[in-house]
Image (tube, rainbow, N blue to C red):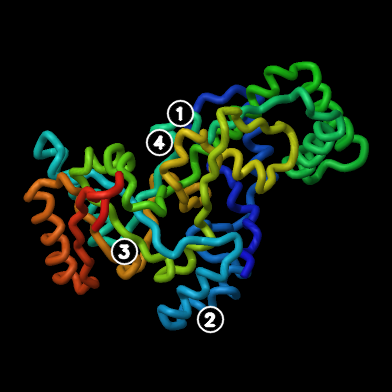
Amino acid sequence: MLKPPLPCGIFTINKADKMNYNLNQIEILQSLDAILQTPGFNSFQLTPLEQSILSDAQNQSHHKRIQFVKSLQPPTPQILYKYYDSPLNKPTEELIHKAKSNLECILLNNELYLSSHTDFNDPFDAYPHYDLTNTTSREILDYCTKSIQTTHPKLKGGALKREIDKLVQSIKTHKEASLQNFVFAMRTINKNYGIYCLTTDPSNVLMWSHYAHNHQGICLEFDISEHLFLTFRLFEVSYKDNKREVLKPFQEFTTKDFEACLLKKAKSWEYEKEWRLIFSNKCHEKLRIPPTLIKKIIIGPKASPETIEYAHEINLKRKEHDLPQLSIKRGRLCDKEYKVTF
């Protein structure tokens, strides 16, 4: 089964009113807002097309839901993982309390915190290169026409043509400044996506080292078949050689641009085998999830007795909250391969 096309609302803009834009940046941001925004679109909710696809599947047996996930094209994993440090590894009581609160938000309150790409450890994340070199006069004219028509819908005839010509001339006369303003506006868009990063690999030694405090943390297992809505917001990251993505400014924002902005990383990150849940205009918000989505806690091979005890305390609290019990597995270093088994 093919996933439905991305709703154009996935490319919407959340204007940062408190920032000090200059006039051109304001105009470009408002222009992009009008061009890309779908009125009333909420990326936390299903579109009518998605709703029609899932109306039957979500209420089927677990086996049938797994079959649904397996039938999706492009292929989508059923099981995904997320590494975390143990709260007990924090150096102060205040930090321990904060880390516990964040983790228990997921495991007890059934909420996922969505980050901005600006929170990530890769400075090139969501940072493609824009180049005007190969942008044609026709592309600039088309962009300016659509921009003026959407921001000034009442303009007609000669008045409309004069405004379009004025914007075209401004871009051509001040190419570098126009490019920088466009890039600023696009990066304002990108940083407002809410993102939750996952992986298909719970055994990777580097992942345990980098994201689970040198194998002293934990790894959570997610079963996507428990919440099929997520399949429409789940995207695979692709990795390439060290040549950065180059995008043309002043043209219609396409799925290819979306992928280049949010789903392309250098090949050196390939070991992460990353998938991302992505929601427009939802950075630093929380996504409600069903309590059955998380199935397992894998405890790092070098986790402290306190961390092990804490994992079991989570299950006791889940029982008090009438939440399903999590399977708790202890990771260990594999005898024959460089990986963690459980």
Q: Quadrant of residue 312?
A: bottom left
Using the image, tell me which numbered label, if any, was put on residue 120.
4
Using the image, tell me which numbered label, if any, was put on residue 148.
none
| Horizontal relation, residue 241 to residue 198: left or right | right
Amino acid on which the number 4 mark rests in the picture: Phe
- Identify the residue at image location x=46%, y=73%: 66
| Horizontal relation, residue 121 to residue 319: left or right | right
- For the N terminus, the quadrant is bottom right
Which residue is label 1 attached to? Answer: 123
Does residue 271 sit above or below 244 in this rendering?
below
Label 4, label 1: how far apart the Cα atoms are: 7 Å
Circles 3 and 1 in contact, beta carbons < 8 Å = no
- Judge by depth and name the residue closer to the eye, 244 or 106: 244
Secondary structure of the residue carrying tag 2 is: helix
Judged by depth in the image, the label closer to the viewer, 3 or 2, is: 3
Using the image, tell me which numbered label, if any, was put on residue 56.
2
Secondary structure of the residue carrying tag 4 is: loop
Q: Quadrant of residue 72?
A: bottom right
Most distant residue in the front direction: 336
Label 3, label 2: how far apart the Cα atoms are: 22 Å
Residue 51, position as x, y percentages in the image: 56, 72
Which residue is label 3 attached to? Answer: 294
Residue 55, position as x, y percentages in the image: 54, 78
Label 2, label 1: how far apart the Cα atoms are: 42 Å
- For the C terminus, the quadrant is bottom left
Label 1 crowding class (10 Å Cα cut-off): few <14, some 14-19, many 20+?
Answer: few
Circles 4 and 1 in contact, beta carbons < 8 Å = no
Tally of marks: 4
- Name the N-terminal-most of marks 3 and 4: 4
